[in-house]
Image: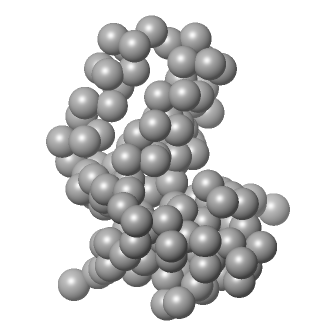
Amino acid sequence: MPSKAFLDTNILLYLLSADAAKAERAEALVGEGGVISIQVLNEFASVASRKLRMTIPEIRQCLEPIVQVCSVEPITLETHVRGLGVAARYGFSIYDSMIVAAALLSGCGTLYSEDFHHRQRIDGLLISNPFPVRR
């Protein structure tokens, strides 16, 4: 049985992309279930409001089906402490480190994101860019 996958905020934002291939890939990943965190939901809402000019009702409507199919990992003191350790060890931003910590603490084997090095491993967690550059 494949391990769970954690979805970073950028994966969810691609659901709204004009790039049909990326939107379809994001939809497939979300459709498989997976795990997100409260931070992912908050970051999505912030970007959708600020950059995409979506209203709060539109953001809620967009996120509703996502939280129906994905498990939502809370942000806890343990997440914070683990995230700081990831930031110190790997030099990632605090917010990216908290995403990694949430993925690790939720027992995921893969973190789908564009924000890290493709195929990097962090404490057994495989980072995978689901939108690799094709040459």
Asked if 95 appears above or below 19 in the picture, the reply is below
Q: Quadrant of residue 32?
A: bottom left
At which x and y percent is residue 116? Answer: 69, 66
Q: Residue at x 61, y 33 (%)?
A: 19
Q: Residue at x 40, y 72 (%)?
A: 78
User: Can I make out residue 118 in this image?
Assistant: no
- Residue 57 on image: x %, y %: 33, 11
Going by the picture, which residue comes out furthest to the left?
68
Q: Position of residue 40 (x, y in %)?
A: 46, 46
Q: Left of 117 or right of it: where is 76?
A: left
Q: Nearer the viewer, residue 67 or 99?
A: 99
Count of numbered marks: 0
Above or below, comparing residue 76 to residue 57 in the picture: below
Q: Quadrant of the N terminus?
A: bottom left
- Colour scheme in use: one colour
Residue occupying the far right of the picture: 135
Is residue 49 shown left or right of residue 67? right
Q: Is residue 17 left or right of residue 36?
A: right
Of residues 135 and 9, the one drawn nearer to the viewer in this rendering: 9
Identify which residue is drawn at 49% across, 82% down. Answer: 125
Vertical placement of residue 28 versus 23, above or below:
below
Q: Does residue 71 appear in the picture of this structure? A: yes
**Residue displayed at 66% across by 60% down:** 94
Question: Where is residue 2 shown, x and y percent of the image?
Answer: 29, 81
Is residue 35 found left or right of 19 in the rendered image? left
Residue 116 vertical placement versus 25 (above, below): below
* Image quarter in which the C terminus is found: bottom right
